[in-house]
Image (cartoon, helix red, strand yellow):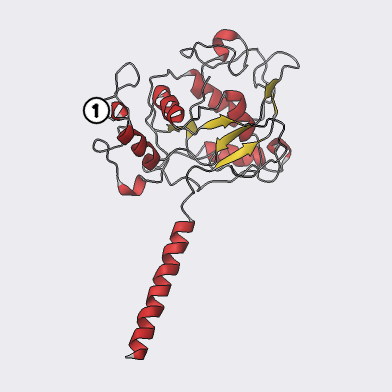
Amino acid sequence: MNALKTGIIASGLIFLCFRLSAQADIPVKGKMAFIPAGKYIPMYSSENETVPVNAFYIDRFPVTNSDFRRFTDQYPEWEKENVKKLFADQGYLKHWTGNPQFELSLAQSPVVNVSWFAAQKYCECQGKRLPTIAEWEMVAEAGLTRPDGQNEAGFNRMILDLASKPNPTKLPAVGTTQQNYYGVWDMHGLVWEWTYDFNSALTTGESRGNATSDNTLFCGGGSLLAKDVNNYAAFLRFALRSSLKAKYTVPNVGFRCVKDAENPDKKTSSKSE
């Protein structure tokens, strides 16, 4: 009897350890990485143009289907069957088989087929916002071991390899590509991502973050020459942004949120909030 009881306890401990191990692989929701103040050099810009970027926090992971379902549960006007045509085209959440249901295996996959309007509203309801191009690109420039990935051996090749992979039928879970210097996952190789001012550069002739309040514009090029002709993955991102409208929904475009740092002079580079 004691041997049987011991066996049951041991089995329970093994099961508990398995559960804890499995949970350890699931990204912690609500965690953000701190990005110190810096500057962004637009790919297309006038000579010596830089965009100053204040310190901010950014989600470590893209928003998942599970995250977005909690949002639609709370704000049913953004459910698949209720969203206004003004704010999303017919592809909105088309990978969700019901309203608002999706395959359980996709719960931790990044949500896609969401419009700019839906992404911005989601962030707003979390007390956050979409990142500007300058903010997003500055984080994307970080390598695995240093903030300036362009100076990290093999960085451009790795990013291009990730960007050029065809999208699988079912997107993998967030936190499955690369974690960069700041502790931010999946900036490359999982999905493309909406930015607040995705469409600003073509009309203004500049790449100045919030230089325009007209969010129906598009992002193209501000000048004739690109600053870094080797950063081909960035060309792909700019090409995608220039093809989008705010109501478009795309099977490989998701998003993550940011918020301003309370203390822009903070020096820490990779601690979670």
What is the quadrant of residue 84 in the picture? top left
Picture coordinates of residue 112, whole percent (x, y): 39, 34
Residue drawn at x 46%, y 19% is: 243
**Screen quadrant of the C terminus:** top right
At numbered mark 1, what does the secondary structure look like: helix, strand or loop? loop
Q: Nearer the viewer, residue 3 or 246?
A: 3
What is the quadrant of residue 89 in the picture? top left
**Screen quadrant of the N terminus:** bottom left
Residue drawn at x 52%, y 40% is: 189
Q: Is residue 162 left or right of residue 87?
A: right
Q: Is residue 260 above or below residue 158?
A: above
What is the quadrant of residue 93 in the picture? top left
Which residue was labeled with disc 1? 81
Q: Is residue 203 above or below residue 229?
A: above
Picture coordinates of residue 144, whole percent (x, y): 65, 45
Count of residue discs: 1
Picture coordinates of residue 60, whole percent (x, y): 54, 41
Picture coordinates of residue 166, whole percent (x, y): 45, 38
Residue type at mark 1 is: Glu
Residue drawn at x 51%, y 16% is: 199
User: Extreme front residue here?
Assistant: 262
10 Å crowding of disc 1: few (<14), some (14-19), many (20+): few
